[in-house]
Amino acid sequence: PSLKDVFADDFKLGTAVLVNEIEDPNSPDAQLVKKHFNSLTAGNELKWDATEPQEGQFNFTRSDKIVDFAVENGIAMRGHTLIWHSQTPSWVFYDENGNLASKELLFARMKRHIDAVVGRYKGKIYAWDVVNEVLEPGDKQPGGLRNSLWYKIAGEEFIEKAFEYAHEADPNAKLFINDYNTNMPEKRQDLHDLIKRLKDKGIPVDGVGHQTHIGIEYPQVQELDDMIQAFTDLNIEQQITELDMSVYTNDNDAYETFPLELQVKQAKRYKEIFDVFRKHADQLTAVIFWGKDDLNTWLRTFPVDRNNWPLLFDERLQAKYAYWALVDPS
Ligand code: XIL
């Protein structure tokens, strides 16, 4: 059975891909995407370092391939991401003398970038992660904001401007604020309050994206339930934007092969989590995996090099117990 069909009454079912996975539309990888998913995210190809590596010099070769693949196959395309502290060229933050850029210069660069990228895919990309990972309670800044170069130069205003520019470039795109560990109570609260402040000011925020990079033990399923519940009063869309489930509980373990006991445990946990997602289907508009199979997963290099089996299909694109738990819960 096709995953997107199983959840057709609930939410879109998505995956992230890198361009090599779909470049040949007849490859097994591309076929798998077409069969199971109706939302697509580019894993790296729409990030600033990919689309505008040098100032004013845009390169859309790889992102076009993914967006075209989505459009041709009737798959809804998500844009990830416009403003982030990572995978952003350092020229963005400095002037020609090598000093930290002024707020005016930073905003001018932001506007040009957002106009170009969002404008190019206007009508083709249905939702954008306008800002990614702007919170870091550990940085101890007001509001729990991350002390990134964006923040150092412009304070919270960079977030407001990003949403305004994106809205001007495509008034119909759904605009998201995306972050990880949004289940953690302190960060969850900071995110909630930030969205409230933005909305009170009339900033066009349409949704919150929960990355949801989780582990085989942590967090408890109830915490994921609470995570979604915590944002319902804001009247915004919610999406699970980068779901995967590491089989580890720490950074030190590494298995040669995937222990059978953990395969079963992972399947049960995926099932429980999707039951929670289903319960919130009136708020949740998409659930997107960060990859489709255990070969094409960032968790084979992050946070350390090791085997990992976080997704629904194995290294040979065969359906895992986790897949069967979702399509045939009996
Ligand atoms: C990851 C990609 O999957 C990797 O290929 C890349 O090397 C680093 O970024 N949160 C995000 C994603 O928002 O953009 C990250 O993607 C994973 C964590």
Image (tube, rainbow, N blue to C red):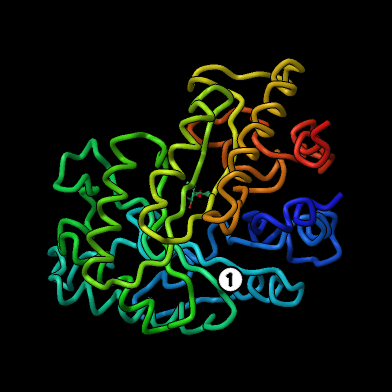
Q: SS of the residue at dot 1?
A: helix
* Near-viewer residue (126 or 42): 126
Residue at (71, 62) in percent of width and height: 38
Residue at (22, 60) in percent of width and height: 197
Residue 316 is situated, as x and y percent measured from the top left of the image, at 82, 40
Residue 284 is situated, as x and y percent measured from the top left of the image, at 55, 54
**Depicted 319 relative to depicted 281: above or below:** above
Residue at (56, 31) in percent of width and height: 305
Residue beneath label 1, please?
Answer: 63
Q: Residue 74's image quarter?
A: bottom right
* Near-viewer residue (263 or 25): 263
Residue 296 is situated, as x and y percent measured from the top left of the image, at 67, 45
Q: Confirm or reject: label 1 Cβ below 8 Å from ligand 1.
A: no
Residue at (79, 60) in percent of width and height: 30
Image quarter (top left, top right, bottom left or bottom right) of the C terminus = top right
Q: Residue 234's image quarter?
A: bottom left
Residue 117 is situated, as x and y percent measured from the top left of the image, at 46, 77
**Depicted 251 relative to depicted 181: above or below:** above
* Near-viewer residue (229 or 193): 229
